[in-house]
Image (cartoon, grey):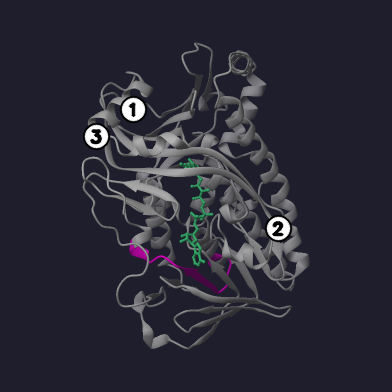
Amino acid sequence: MPVNSSGQERQSYGTVFYWHPTVRQHATGQRPGGPIEIDTMSNKPTTDTEKNTEQSFDVTIIGGGMVGLTAAIGLAQSGFNVAVVERAPKGDLTAAEYDGRSSALAFANCRMLEALGIWRHMEQYAQPINEIRVSDGPSLLHLHFDHKALGEGPLGNMVENRHTRIALFERLNELKNIQLFLGNDIESLERTAEKTVVSLASGTEITSKLLLGTDGRNSMVRRSANIPVSVFDYKQYGIVCSIEHEIGHEGIAHERFLPAGPFAILPLTGNRSSLVWTEKAHLVNTIMALPERSFAAEIQRRTGDFLGKIKPVGGRWAYPLSLQYADAYTDTRMAILGDAAHGIHPIAGQGLNLGLRDVAALIEVITDSARVGLDIGSEQVLDGYAGWRHADNAALISVTDLLNRLFSNDVAPIRAARDIGLAVVNEIPPLKNFFMSHARGTVGELPKLLRGEAL
Ligand SMILES: Cc1cc2nc3c(=O)[nH]c(=O)nc-3n(C[C@H](O)[C@H](O)[C@H](O)COP(=O)(O)OP(=O)(O)OC[C@H]3O[C@@H](n4cnc5c(N)ncnc54)[C@H](O)[C@@H]3O)c2cc1C
């Protein structure tokens, strides 16, 4: 395990780099005592006693991240019996050190979380985003989005991922038709024209009509179908931490384009903000190992003094940044959603938002299909999902990639051109409103859940 210059431990969470001045141990991977299954119907952990059982569901979801758990809740609310298989135990998924990120959730996605009964469990941790200010280094030309221009609620909300994960588990506990298989490794995945079979290392065999892969960028479900994936390594990391500050943020999110890449200051509840500091890969180890005072000084240099004196709180995380997209979203009795289908740069805070849009579209397609008696795992049904989401995702994937390439460099003519671009957008209200509607997630052919409607 690597140790930093002050003798403090740095820990690796898969490909994510995590460092905390005080935490010395994480509960990560398997815990002693073997796999744990939590039965949400009884709310009791069930252990080896349920080995070698065969259980049948409508849908099996592999991956209990934010996308997978939201899908499970939405499907259960539509009346389907759902199994969720997740390799991490619940204690890890909801631990403060598991995921240091906070997400900017677009207005339409918050509406969906409300329709699914999740929002009420997380609302108290949500900080409305009223304005977004975009600036290019020291340039005075900038772009300013204010929710008042559209005359409807905030542009979105910032919520720490940990609170979202806890809210998802709280909502799961209220639903009868979901079973979680947490802390479980998968031994094999099998899909035939009739059914899908997932065999767990604990001996349980899960059969269903449809398999969903919400198992992140390195998706086992996607790989099992040999779906090709295009990957581009940005050779950048997103360093993430929270700060406390003297002066209030007034619900304003700031995106600054610095030579190494975007530096985002995103408002959290209270006098706190979440930072996403994009940095060149070769500098990340040094920054992650900086003593607290030097780390704080580097942040203060980048934020300036509009928030007064800042102080980093909690740990630091560094996420490798890359673009990846799968060629297909479906295969026999299978669909992939969220990062398993598309992973993008966090420059516009849209990765999770896209994943939740996948969820809303899929639930609508299969709920409507089941109502008219169609097989929810059939090609005809799954094509409806893939066609809908491919077009929507492709546009945003291209835009975020272009933005990062355009703004992560310091070439004078490019800088001049992009500054003029920012100023032009700022002065043309219809163009500005168009971008704001995108940030709110209210553009395109919206599934009912994103319109806040029941299915
Ligand atoms: C620095 C940074 C900032 C970001 N900020 C924002 C933002 O502001 N707004 C936004 O919308 N998005 C943001 N994103 C993107 C967002 O975090 C991701 O898009 C989102 O977390 C993807 O969720 P997911 O559930 O699809 O995948 P994951 O979060 O990767 O979840 C996958 C789950 O599957 C499990 N799993 C994997 N393999 C297996 C297996 N074989 N068996 C069982 N379980 C398995 C994993 O343990 C995990 O729990 C950001 C990303 C970064 C890096």
The residue under label 2 is 385
Quarter occupied by residue 290: top left
- The quadrant the C terminus occupies is bottom right
Q: What's under tag 3, amino acid-wise?
A: Glu
Counting from the top left corner in percent of width and height, residue 96 is at 31, 52
The residue under label 3 is 292
Is 60 situated above or below 199?
above
- 1 vs 2, front mark: 1
| Mark 1 lies within 8 Å of ligand 1 (Cβ measured) | no
Question: Label 1: how many residues lie within 10 Å, few (<14), some (14-19) or many (20+)?
Answer: some
Quarter occupied by residue 282: top left
Question: Of callouts 1 and 3, which one flags the residue occurring earlier in the amino acid sequence?
Answer: 3
The residue under label 1 is 299
Counting from the top left corner in percent of width and height, residue 348 is at 54, 35
Question: Label 2: how many residues lie within 10 Å, few (<14), some (14-19) or many (20+)?
Answer: many
Counting from the top left corner in percent of width and height, residue 439 is at 57, 35
**Residue range corresponding to the magenta coloring:** 76-91
Asked if residue 328 lies in the magenta stretch, the reply is no
Apparent side of residue 367 relative to residue 7 in the rendered image (left or right): right
Rounded to the nearest angstrom, the CA distance separating label 1 from label 3 is 11 Å
